[in-house]
Amino acid sequence: MAEVELPDPKELEEMREQSFTRRTALVTALYAVCLAVVSLGGNNATKEMSLAQQQASDQWAFYQAKAMRAQLYHIEKLRVEDDLAERGSTLAAAARQHKEKLLETVGREEQRYEGEKKEIEEKARELEHERDKNETKDPYFDFGEVLLQISIVLASMSILTRSRTIFHASLVAAVTGFALGLNGYLLLFRLPFL
């Protein structure tokens, strides 16, 4: 009968630890990929938030310019109306006709600027909504990034200490961080403190 060689328990333990180290290293690499994706989302949300704020500010400045123009035409309309009311009967027919035509033109311009103002206001409010949406997303990305960075540190510590408990803590941090980062993209839920 052939002899069966039993493996050395120390060798088995070493092989098991090497397997744990390899798996933990691969999982840590996966954490890093998740961190990169969440970080990208956070950077984009911040850029989009800033861009939308700048564009909204530009739209409000444009709105203000249109409002000033509309007000100027309104003042001119009031001046012409006053002039017609005051001197209308004493004006020559041609002068009266000219003033009435001017009044009509000024009124049309006032209405045009008022209409343009409304369009600009709608666009500014859309941009403010976009800014607010990205502002809501940003903290989820931030907390997701932090938790994924912590998970990488914990996974590295678990390799050094050969502690499965620390590795499991890194898994919890990574899953929570990835869920928050994913929520930054999709806004599936809202945390009350964010």
Image (cartoon, grey):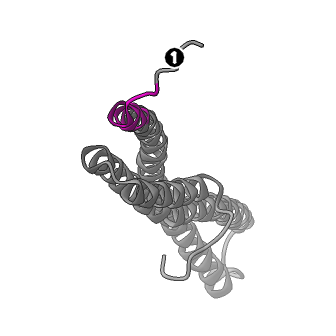
Q: With respect to residue 8, does 87 lie above or below? A: below
Q: Which of 85 and 23 is in front in this view?
A: 23
Residue 82 appears left or right of 141:
right
Q: Is 174 covered by the magenta stretch?
A: no
Q: Which of 100 and 5 is in front in this view?
A: 5
Mark 1 nearby-residue class (10 Å; few <14, some 14–19, many ≥20):
few
- Residue 17: x and y in percent read 37, 38
Which quadrant of the figure contains the N terminus?
Answer: top right
Quarter of the image holding residue 36?
A: top left
- Residue 25: x and y in percent read 39, 35
* Three-letter amino acid code at the position of disc 1: Glu
The residue segment tinted magenta is 6-19
Q: Is mark 1 on a helix, strand or loop?
A: loop
Q: Which of 136 and 18 is in front in this view?
A: 18
Q: Which residue is located at x 61 percent, y 74 percent? A: 80
Q: Which of 24 and 105 is in front in this view?
A: 24
**Is the stretch drawn in magenta largely helix, strand or loop?**
helix
